Image (cartoon, grey):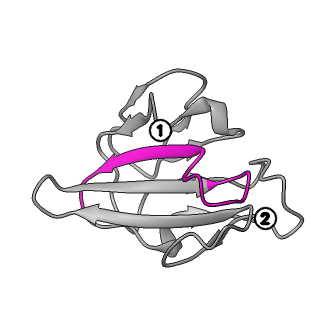
């Protein structure tokens, strides 16, 4: 059971065996231009912790099907061919895309794979 912190830059993260938690505090820890890669995420065991993530929104992070322009919206997408999920969060609002991006290798993710509060 490990707790891993992404930190700034395009990190390659492996938790190994056990229940691992990958913690993020801010958007600049994993950007669309230089995303972190979580290489061995196991659904039902591991978690991505965004409880202290500063969204700039009083509502915190909300998972949506697509960005509507509100700050704090998050989307999950899955590339079945490459077995990679994208976790994208739009912090600034507007329609300019995501400000935070993490790539997760393995099975598709859902909201239950995250700690938000």
Question: Which residue is painted at 64% across and 41% down in the image?
Answer: 24
Mark in the foreground, 2 or 1: 1
Residue sitting farthest toward the right: 58
Residue 3 in sight from this viewpoint: yes
Q: Position of residue 115 (x, y in %)?
A: 63, 62
Q: Quadrant of residue 4?
A: top right
Q: Which residue corresponds to the image point at 83% horizontal and 70% vertical from the top-left? A: 59
User: Which part of the image, by quadrant, shows the C terminus?
Assistant: bottom right
Residue 15 appearing in the image? no
Q: Residue at 60% across / 31% down in the picture?
A: 29
Q: Residue furthest left?
A: 81
Q: Position of residue 34 (x, y in %)?
A: 44, 28
Magenta stretch, residue numbers: 90-107
Image quadrant assignment for residue 73: bottom right
In front here: 40 or 27? 27
Left or right of residue 31, residue 27 in this image = right
Q: Position of residue 6 (x, y in %)?
A: 55, 31
**Left or right: where 16 falls relative to 21:** left
Q: Which residue is mark 1?
A: 32
Residue drawn at (67%, 53%) of the image: 50
The residue wearing badge 2 is 60
Given residues 85 and 95, the one toward you in this image is 95
Q: Crowdedness of circle 1 by 10 Å Cα count: few (<14), some, many (20+)?
A: some
Is 40 positioned to the left or the right of 73 in the image? left
Residue 91 located within the stretch drawn in magenta? yes
């Amino acid at each position: 059971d490990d707790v891993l912190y992404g930190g700034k830059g395009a990190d390659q993260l492996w938790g190994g065996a056990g229940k691992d938690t990958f913690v993020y505090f801010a958007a600049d820890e994993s950007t669309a231009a230089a995303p972190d890669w979580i290489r061995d995420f196991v659904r039902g065991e591991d978690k991505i912790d965004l409880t202290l993530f500063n969204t700039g929104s009083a509502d915190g992070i909300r998972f949506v099907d697509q960005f509507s322009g509100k700050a704090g919206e998050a989307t999950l997408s899955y590339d079945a061919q490459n077995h990679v999920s994208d976790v994208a969060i739009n912090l600034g609002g507007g329609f300019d895309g995501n400000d935070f991006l993490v790539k997760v290798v393995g099975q598709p993710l859902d909201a239950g794979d995250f700690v938000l509060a």
